[in-house]
Image: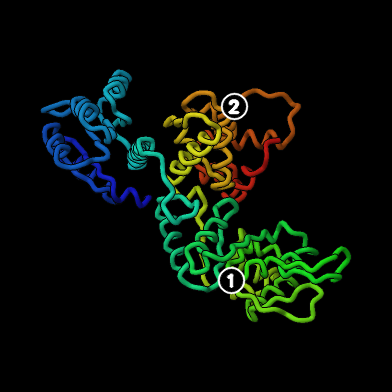
Amino acid sequence: MKEAAKRERVLVVDDAPDTLEVLQRNLTSKQYRVFTAPGVAEAIQVLDQTPVDLVITDLKMPKGSGLDLVRYVRENLKDTEVILITGYASIEGAVQAVKSGAEEYLSKPFTDGELFEAVQRSMEKLRLRRARQKALPVIPAGRFGLLGESETMSRVWQDVAKAASTTATVLISGESGTGKELVARAIHYRSTRSAAPFVAVNCGGIPEGLLESELFGHVKGAFTGATESRAGFFQTADGGTIFLDEVSDTSLAMQAKLLRVLQEKEVCMVGARRAQKVDVRVLAATNKDLFGLVKKGGFREDLYFRLNVINISLPPLRERGDDILLLARHFAARFAEEAGKPTPQFSENALQVLMRFDWPGNVRELENVIQRLVVMTDGDVIDIPDLPPLMRFSAPRVNGLNRTLAEVEADYIRNVLAGVGGNKTRAAEILGIDRKTLREKLKMPAP
């Protein structure tokens, strides 16, 4: 159960004491705060005195109908969901319940699983509605482009503040697109070195033969084409911070040279005979399991421990809850301003899809998707048909025999995902693969 659920309040209304007791016990076990009432009048008293997120009410009660309570909630409370339960199920009853404003309609007898699923769906709708009603987010001062209010990101803020107060090396780990460079910049600009340079280096983007010269510089004549002496990134960052992104992509030989820099606080330019002192704080980042590479011999153990004095682990976007909505609205506002367009709104259905999607590319992927939506959507509201095809439901259809195996597999995976409401764990079980393999297949471009 999410941490947010511990703050969510549920009012259960039923004239049967046994039913009240069972529902209260089951919902309390899921960390909801549960109130009970034996009838409509008593329920209204509770609602007048206590904010409630969800009302679960029986339909037929001696002193008032559950439909009366549904109408009361809809006409008096803007921020409360309703589930109607009844032992007299009928199509007419379901239609009437929905027309009155009930979000869910459960027929007795129902299982604990059916109850919990209905409650979770109602709570998700409530969170989405609340997210839409919030003002557009403003990046808090000092967070340097980082945005998020989830519990996992709160821990990142705390780690950044602690790291900024020291001069120790920091290893930032996380999947691609989670914002590792933003964290590094936040550490630098909150530290005592903020007035000095911050130099970011993508170790994986520089050919191995050039990396040493780029990092440490070279003297004139050190190699063919070295027509003049040139300082490297470490000299450029003197007094400040150097950020070594994807440090796991460096060779073992380069790792030995980086280790010397960390130990001796000096660099030796390519072709030079003497080393020179540098005052540089090193921050490094990786999207790989660095300790796993150490055990396989792909990364030096001594360098790993030199870098991993402080470790900050960034959560993937799929584990950041409502931050997805916060970021989506932030990007929509930013790109709309750049394009000179009004900021579009998101339909609740579109927000649900954004929340369910796995986001293998994390925040960077979300940013790219929102930019495309802002540019390509003509209306004021972004709805499900505007979303990329991979995020939309794809109904099974008859296809010819002229498709590749990769196309058939991609279609089948999308259909399975759609059939289980985007539940990656369930989809992986049906497909007979693990979640990691499923994520990898979802990353593959469409054939």
Q: Residue furthest top?
A: 92
The percent coordinates of residue 425 (x first, y second) are 51, 46
Label 1 secondary element = loop
The disc labelled 2 sits on which kind of residue? Pro
Res 361 visible: yes
Q: In this view, does 188 lie to the left or right of 406?
A: left
Q: Residues within 10 Å of mark 2 (few under 14, many from 20)?
A: few
The disc labelled 1 sits on which kind of residue? Gly
- The quarter of the image holding the C terminus is top right
* Residue bearing mark 2: 396
Q: Which residue lies at the image location 28% right of the left edge and 46% below the top edge?
A: 8
Q: Quadrant of residue 9?
A: top left
The percent coordinates of residue 429 (x first, y second) are 55, 45
The percent coordinates of residue 28 (x first, y second) are 26, 49
Q: Is residue 226 left or right of residue 316?
A: right
Q: Which residue lies at the image location 53% right of the left edge and 34% below the top edge?
A: 418
Q: State the residue in front, 23 or 296.
A: 296
Q: Nearer the viewer, mark 2 or mark 1?
A: 1
Q: In this view, does 227 lie to the left or right of 119?
A: right
The tag on residue 239 is 1
Q: Is residue 37 left or right of residue 334?
A: left
Find out whether the residues at labels 2 and 1 contact each other: C-beta distance under 8 Å: no
Q: In which quarter of the image is residue 180?
A: bottom right
Q: How crowded is mark 1: few (under 14 residues within 10 Å), some or many (20 or more)?
A: some
Q: In which quarter of the image is residue 388?
A: top right
Q: State the residue in front, 221 or 408.
A: 221
Res 289 visible: no
* Residue 378, placed above or below residue 276: above
Q: Could you tell which of marks 2 and 1 lies nearer the N-terminus?
A: 1
Label 2 secondary element = loop
